[in-house]
């Protein structure tokens, strides 16, 4: 019971904001609300009351007011406030008070906690920032609190506002510098410190901080929007941020005293209403007043020194003639008015004289400065010009020094150790610091692993092989930076560490790029060249890109073993692919079958399910499709009628793909639908070709409540219709050729049309026949080719398939039982979803570039073509296929299958899916199926590190194929890193211009240089212009030289953010500055160690001093 009461007491929140934050309580109560509303876990009764007491406490010789923190349980906590500021600061600091309040609330300690409790270092950082903000609250109150401003004299208020502006300016400058390399103030997540500083800024947004302020503080602006994006902050401060539209940085002015101004105006009106004439007594009094004032003025001595301020004698007022009778009853009261008036006139004249003198001084000063400027003097402008000239000379000198040093380094033998003692530079230069080291490392063989187990324990990792379609981007740089960090750590920890480099041939992607290149440069297609010459062009292109990629890996400092570098089209890996295909075929896991495939009419190839991207179409939408000039209508349900054979009526059906009605072979209705009971077993007539279409009943496919309750069946072009056709033995009629044109299978006048042009013409045809029944919006999902963005067409094709059911079950089990660990653990759910719902894998591709399938079609001499069938066509016979590692083995297998026959073999024209060869990479890179020393020493590997986007594309394939062919897992752990996006959170895309070569960040690049990189690709001219605009917006000054170390540091630091990395190149520049600081610190150490210093041969940590 006692522990229960203590836990209840700890859940209370001991904060009252108004006691801490002066008079602008509304802003700070919002801040407190945002903190407490993070998880909705804190109710109002959790707040305690912090109240003043009459007690005082002596601290460091000073008596400070004491505060008592009271809770509903009656527990009190006494703290002392610094009386020097209205922003109360406790003895232990405001941050410590927040810690007491928030950390004690267990509900707030989550993955999105506002107060990081995992690290004492983070605790202290949050505390420090909270104390900094609380110390600035007094300045904040001075600028925004009307109540406080009214209590201060005008002259004093102006000074206070000036000091407040200076204090806040210093704070914001520090924040700007801090946020250059940090997302939030104190930790990798949002904390109380961020909310409190946000509150400070939000109170100044609308009226105080102008547009110039935000232009000078881009990192603070970015942080402001990031913090505001959190729901708890939006709830407290509003959904939108309203900025001050004035230009000046600070729009601060002391408020006028409205009460005093109003009294002055009333007095002026009263005087104007009063008659200007005065009686003779008043005139006499005025004269006396002038005489009384004259001696006083004359008593002032004449000026003896020009520096002394001169006094001005007030002029004697001229008496005004009387305008009426003698003074009335109030004349005695008004006797003093002329005297006061004379005094005011004297004061006014004195002020004007001072003002004139001040203006004269300013004019003289301006004249002197102008003369100095004309004579070439050292005025402000000349000083600036001189400083700029000196800076330019210094920069020029540094550049000359850098070029001379680089020239010296380049003259040294390649691979020789860098002579640091001969490199003397005063400033940090990434080019010089990083020069020569990698070639020396590579020559010395520091990255080459020994397969003889000299160290007793090994650590192996394979690089995710990049595609040879282009160059590496920052996503690859992130992968390499993480993997190199891990490998170097393992190597230093005593492991025989091996990091296997490699590249992937990327079948569809590379062939598409080369085909576009050939058409653009030579106006040729691959068919114009023929298979052999086209493959020569692809090999040439792949070699060029591969060389560029390997150079990029070197420039990134990756410690890969270059003696074991692999390419998925190498002879050793081609041998592994053939072996894997034959073994899986012999085990019955690979088979040939004619089934519906995802067909890309633009690339003329089949695709696997994971190579299809789906988009949601909410209703009638016009979309652009490759190969079509006009946009095509999608998301529309078209209804039309089939006439009954006996012409006794019609049956209305609906479809989203009206062009497929040319291949309809049945119409299905539900057997229990009373509307169509009389039509069971009857026939309809096709309006285009007169084909008889049976009306069938099917309870699986038909939903009576949807549409008309009648469904057209096109078995050769729809997955659901395909299954229905198999159940009912329907005819399968293919109406498209490989290019998406209408063929001649009963298509009438529509033969030769493009599929989507035919869509329009068929509607016109049905309208003419009187069979069209209308259109309506229909929400749908549309499948697109992930490479060409063409609309996927389900087509009936004979293909090679992998039976994945048992392998998928095994892949689920190894994760569930802990044999394979996936990090982060959240992705296990994704793994289970994919593997538990896995379908058979179509592995054949109608391409020329890739691993040609080791399967051969048997033709028997003397038989007709119709009898034997044509391979790759629907007429082929599945029994005619044989498999062999080479043609001799295939012929031997064919003779066993067809004894006594004269046989002619034709190898399959298709190639294997790229992911088939990539799935073998962990062991094919060690020259499997041969039993090599490398295979024995380094397989299975210990870790796979890659992006989470290819978890199913690549990781799952490796697990399934390794378990099938090797009997073991290819690795023990899978570490999935974040996706790299641009600073705006957009996916990297060449058309957006945000795909950045890591070399551009390492060496720096101009905006014009960035534009040139777009011209080397295959972008459409319109996309090039769009990409240029994106580059100009993101990198108006180009990209500053950052160096490899800064880039890697930034990328690895980003990985703590979460699933996606919104990479801002400015943060990489910030880490370059950090490298500069490290360089200067070490340079200082080297200067003080002396020329005769020699580093120790070994370091014993236990013998090193603590400080």
Image (cartoon, rainbow, N blue to C red):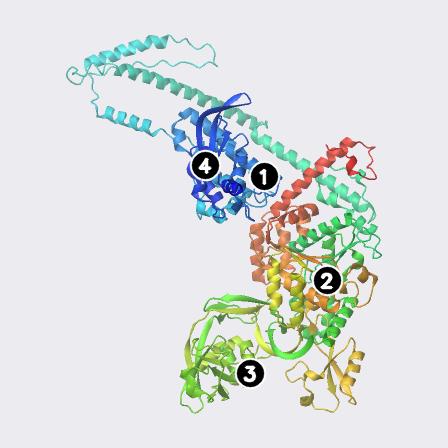
- Residue 710 is left or right of residue 421, and the answer is left
Measure the C-alpha gap from mark 4 to mark 1: 21 Å
x and y percentages locating residue 914 in the rendered image? 69, 68
Image quarter hosting the C terminus: top right
Q: Nearer the viewer, residue 429 or 347?
A: 429
Q: Residue at x 48, y 49 (%)?
A: 231
Where 1038 falls versus 589 (above or below)? above
- Which residue has dot 1 on it? 123
Seen at 79% across and 76% down, the residue is 886
SS category of the residue bearing label 3: helix
Q: Quadrant of residue 887?
A: bottom right
- Mark on residue 970? 2
Q: CA distance from mark 2 to mark 3?
A: 41 Å
Number of the label disc, if any, that sits on residue 16: 4
- Is tag 3's residue or tag 4's residue first in the polypeptide sequence? 4
Q: Earlier in the sequence, mark 2 or mark 1?
A: 1
Evaluate if marks 2 and 4 touch, with contact meaning CB atoms under 8 Å apart. no
Q: Is residue 335 visible?
A: yes
């Amino acid at each position: 019971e006692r522990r229960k009461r203590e836990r209840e007491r700890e859940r209370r929140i001991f904060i009252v904001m108004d006691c801490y934050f002066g008079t602008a309580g509304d802003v700070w109560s919002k801040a407190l609300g945002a903190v407490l509303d993070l998880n909705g876990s804190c109710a109002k009764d959790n707040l305690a009351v912090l109240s003043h007491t009459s007690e005082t406490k002596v601290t460091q010789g000073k008596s400070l007011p004491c505060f008592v923190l009271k809770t509903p349980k009656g527990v009190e906590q006494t703290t002392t406030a610094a009386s020097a500021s209205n922003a109360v600061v406790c003895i232990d600091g405001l941050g410590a008070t927040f810690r007491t309040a928030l950390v004690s609330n267990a509900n707030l300690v989550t993955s999105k906690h506002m107060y990081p409790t995992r690290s004492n270092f983070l605790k202290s950082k949050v505390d420090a920032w909270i104390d900094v903000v609380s110390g600035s609250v007094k300045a904040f109150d001075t600028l925004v609190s009307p109540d406080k401003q009214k209590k201060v004299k005008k002259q004093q208020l102006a000074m206070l506002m000036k000091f407040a502006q200076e204090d806040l300016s210093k704070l914001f400058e520090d924040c700007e510098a801090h946020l250059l390399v940090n997302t939030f103030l104190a930790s990798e997540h949002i904390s109380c410190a961020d909310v409190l500083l946000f509150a400070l800024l939000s109170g100044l947004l609308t009226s105080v901080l102008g547009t110039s302020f935000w232009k000078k503080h881009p990192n603070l602006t970015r942080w402001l929007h990031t913090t505001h994006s959190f729901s708890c902050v939006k709830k407290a401060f509003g959904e939108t941020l309203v900025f001050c539209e004035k230009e000046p940085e600070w729009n601060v002015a002391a408020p006028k005293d409205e009460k005093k101004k109003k009294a002055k105006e009333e007095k002026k009106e009263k005087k104007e209403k009063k008659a200007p004439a005065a009686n003779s007594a008043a005139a006499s009094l005025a004269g006396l007043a002038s005489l009384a004032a004259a001696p006083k003025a004359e008593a002032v001595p004449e000026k003896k020194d020009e520096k002394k301020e001169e006094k001005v004698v007030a002029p004697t007022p001229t008496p005004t003639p009387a305008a009426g009778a003698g003074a009335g009853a109030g004349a005695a009261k008004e006797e003093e008015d002329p005297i006061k008036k004379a005094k005011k006139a004297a004061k006014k004249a004195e002020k004007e004289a001072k003002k004139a003198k001040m203006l004269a001084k300013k004019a003289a000063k301006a004249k002197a400065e102008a003369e100095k400027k004309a004579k070439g003097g050292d005025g402000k402008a000349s000083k600036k010009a001189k400083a700029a000239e000196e800076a330019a000379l210094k920069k020029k000198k540094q550049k000359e020094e850098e070029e001379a040093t680089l020239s010296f380094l380049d003259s040294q033998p390649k691979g020789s150790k860098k002579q640091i003692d001969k490199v003397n530079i005063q400033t940090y230069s990434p080019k010089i610091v990083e020069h020569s080291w990698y070639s020396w490392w590579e020559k010395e063989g520091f990255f080459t692993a020994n397969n003889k187990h000299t160290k007793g324990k090994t650590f192996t990792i394979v690089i995710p092989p990049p595609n040879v379609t282009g160059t590496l981007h920052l996503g690859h740089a992130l992968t390499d930076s993480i993997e190199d960090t891990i490998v170097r750590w393992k190597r230093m920890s005593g492991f025989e560490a091996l990091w296997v480099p490699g590249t992937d041939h990327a079948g569809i992607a590379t062939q598409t790029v080369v085909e576009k290149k050939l058409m653009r440069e030579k106006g040729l297609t691959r068919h114009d060249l023929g298979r052999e010459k086209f493959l020569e062009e692809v090999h040439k292109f792949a070699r060029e890109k591969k060389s560029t990629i390997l150079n990029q890996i070197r420039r990134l400092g990756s410690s890969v073993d270059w003696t074991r570098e692999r390419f998925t089209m190498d002879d050793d890996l081609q041998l592994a692919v053939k072996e894997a295909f034959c073994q899986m075929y012999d085990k019955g896991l690979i088979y040939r079958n004619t089934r519906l495939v995802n067909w890309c009419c633009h690339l003329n190839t089949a695709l696997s399910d994971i190579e299809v991207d789906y988009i949601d179409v909410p209703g009638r939408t016009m979309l652009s499709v490759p190969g079509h000039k006009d946009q095509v209508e999608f998301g529309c349900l078209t209804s039309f009628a089939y006439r009954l054979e006996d012409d006794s009526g019609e049956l209305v059906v609906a479809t989203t793909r009206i062009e497929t009605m040319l291949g309809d072979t049945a119409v299905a209705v539900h057997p229990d639908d009373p509307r169509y009971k009389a039509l069971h077993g009857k026939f309809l007539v096709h309006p285009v070709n007169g084909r008889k279409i049976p009306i069938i009943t099917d309870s699986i496919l038909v939903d009576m409540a949807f549409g008309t309750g009648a469904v057209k069946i096109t078995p050769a072009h729809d997955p659901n219709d395909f299954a229905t056709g198999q159940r009912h033995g329907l005819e399968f009629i293919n109406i498209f050729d490989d290019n998406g044109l209408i063929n001649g299978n009963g298509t009438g006048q529509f033969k030769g049309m493009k599929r989507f042009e035919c869509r329009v013409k068929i509607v016109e045809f049905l309208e003419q026949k009187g069979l069209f029944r209308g259109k309506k919006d229909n929400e749908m999902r549309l499948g697109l080719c992930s490479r060409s963005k063409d609309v996927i067409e389900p087509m009936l094709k004979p293909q090679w398939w992998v039976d994945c059911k048992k392998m998928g079950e095994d892949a689920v089990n190894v994760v569930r039982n802990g044999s394979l660990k996936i990090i982060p653990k959240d992705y296990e759910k994704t793994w289970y979803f994919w593997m538990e719902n896995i379908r058979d894998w179509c592995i054949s591709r109608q391409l020329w570039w890739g691993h040609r399938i080791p399967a051969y079609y048997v033709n028997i001499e003397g038989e007709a073509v119709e009898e034997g069938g044509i391979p790759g066509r629907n007429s082929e016979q599945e029994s005619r296929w044989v498999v062999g590692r080479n043609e001799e083995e295939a012929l031997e297998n064919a003779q066993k299958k067809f004894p006594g026959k004269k046989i002619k073999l034709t190898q399959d024209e298709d190639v294997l899916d790229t992911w088939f060869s990539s799935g073998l990479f962990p062991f094919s890179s060690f020259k499997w199926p041969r039993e090599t020393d490398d295979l024995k020493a380094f397989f299975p590997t210990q870790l796979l590190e890659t992006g989470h986007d290819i978890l199913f594309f690549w990781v799952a394939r490796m697990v399934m194929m390794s378990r099938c062919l090797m009997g073991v897992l290819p690795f023990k752990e899978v570490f999935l890193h974040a996706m790299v996006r641009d600073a705006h959170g957009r996916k990297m895309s060449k058309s957006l211009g945000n795909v950045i070569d890591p070399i551009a960040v390492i060496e720096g690049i101009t905006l014009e240089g960035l534009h040139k990189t777009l011209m080397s690709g295959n972008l459409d001219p319109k996309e090039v212009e769009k990409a240029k605009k994106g580059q100009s917006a993101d990198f108006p000054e180009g990209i500053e030289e950052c160096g490899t170390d800064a880039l890697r540091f930034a990328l690895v630091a980003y990985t703590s953010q979460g699933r996606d990395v919104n990479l801002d190149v400015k943060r990489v520049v910030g880490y370059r500055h950090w490298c500069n600081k490290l360089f200067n610190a070490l340079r200082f150490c080297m200067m003080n160690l002396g020329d005769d210093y020699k580093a120790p041969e070994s370091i014993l940590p236990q013998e090193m001093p603590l400080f």
